[in-house]
Amino acid sequence: MTTQKIDASQLGGVSETALLTLNGRAHQASLPGAILRDPMAIKVVDSIDFDFDKFGRKGQEMALRSLAVDSCAVSYLRAHPQATVVALAEGFQTSFWRLSDAIPDPQFHWMSVDLPPVIELRERLLPPSPRITALAQSALDYSWMDRVDTANGVFITAEGLLMYLQPNEAMDLIAQCAKRFPGGQMFFDVPPVFVKKLAPKGMKSSKHYRVPPMPFSLTTVQLADLVNTVPGITAVHDIPMPKGRGFFFDKVWPAIWNFGPTKRFRGSYTLLEFG
């Protein structure tokens, strides 16, 4: 990892949100009693020359999402220790190192797929590993699928990706993954469906930053129905909200997340099984 600050100001649009999520995780990981152990995220933030303050608050949401996807990935990797994990639009996620710490004698392989400017920065900011392959391309360029070793299982992550795609793009990506990777799993998150109507030009996270528009989402009912509408999907799991820090995130928010009448109004962490 570099010892000099790396300028990341060239990132814009959806790619810039990778810095927002990185900063949120690193901040939460640096707090006393942290809910997420992510020393690599802290190191990466310290290595970047960027005005992170423009993003505004650094709440627990990004750390909670990381806990959710890590739990799903660990479960899959325990059953398929030599699987390939494909991180679509990975940004500056540091999941590879968290999972390597969580699994004794890690043998899984990692494929990081993102646009060239992001991959170039990742390779300057993060240490290399013989178990990591980086592909500088869009997740919608399906040639990445030809590079995946499917012999020992495939776990796909699409954190913070699908909501920024057009609905037909997001659904086609899901369908192609289901078609190409039988026996695999896919984790993704989507915001509440009202977000695209409430903020068609994107939500403001602070007076200095507006998150890009999020044209895609599905309700929990629509997500559950994917098992009937997308060939190759054999199961859809609505992943519970992990417990966070403080009374609200430890007790209230997980309870609201699991309360039946409110489910259709919230976002979702979704795990798909392919067969």
Image (spheres, rainbow, N blue to C red):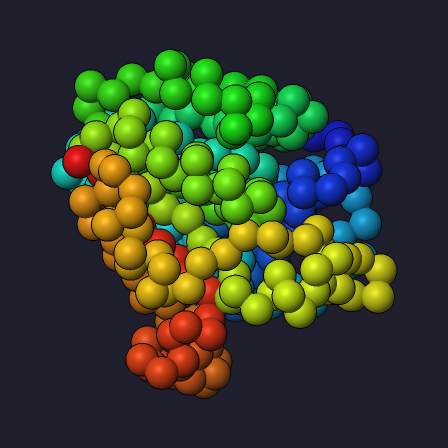
The residue drawn where x is 37% and y is 30% is 176
Rendering quarter of residue 85: top left
State the image coordinates of residue 275 (x, y, percent, origin top left): 17, 36
- Quadrant for the N terminus, please: top right
Query: Measuring 36% from the left and 60% from the top, which residue is drawn there?
Result: 222
Q: At which x and y percent is residue 87?
A: 44, 34
> Relative to the observer, which residue lies in front, 269 or 177?
177
Q: Residue 219, image x and y in percent?
A: 42, 64
Q: Residue 53, located in which quarter of the rendered image?
A: bottom right
Q: Is residue 105 left or right of residue 144?
A: left
User: Toward the viewer: 41 or 230?
Assistant: 230
Q: Compared with residue 248, is residue 104 higher up or lower down, i.e. above or below?
A: above
Instruction: Relative to 51, say whether 250 is above or below.
Output: below
Q: Residue furthest right?
A: 208
**Up-down: is 175 above or below 53?**
above
Q: Quadrant of residue 210?
A: bottom right
> Looking at the image, how many numbered discs can be counted on the residues?
0
Query: Is 56 left or right of 86, judged from the image as shown?
Result: right
Where in the figure is residue 43, as x and y percent of width and height? 60, 42
Relative side of 243 to 90, left or right = left
Q: Residue at x 67, y 39 (%)?
A: 15
Nearer the observer, 79 or 239:
239
Asked if one can make out residue 181 in the rendered structure from this viewpoint, the answer is: yes
77 on left or right of 266? left
Is residue 40 shown to the viewer in this render? no
> Which residue corresponds to the image point at 43% horizontal and 35% vertical from the top-left?
173
Among all residues in the image, which is located at the extreme front?
229
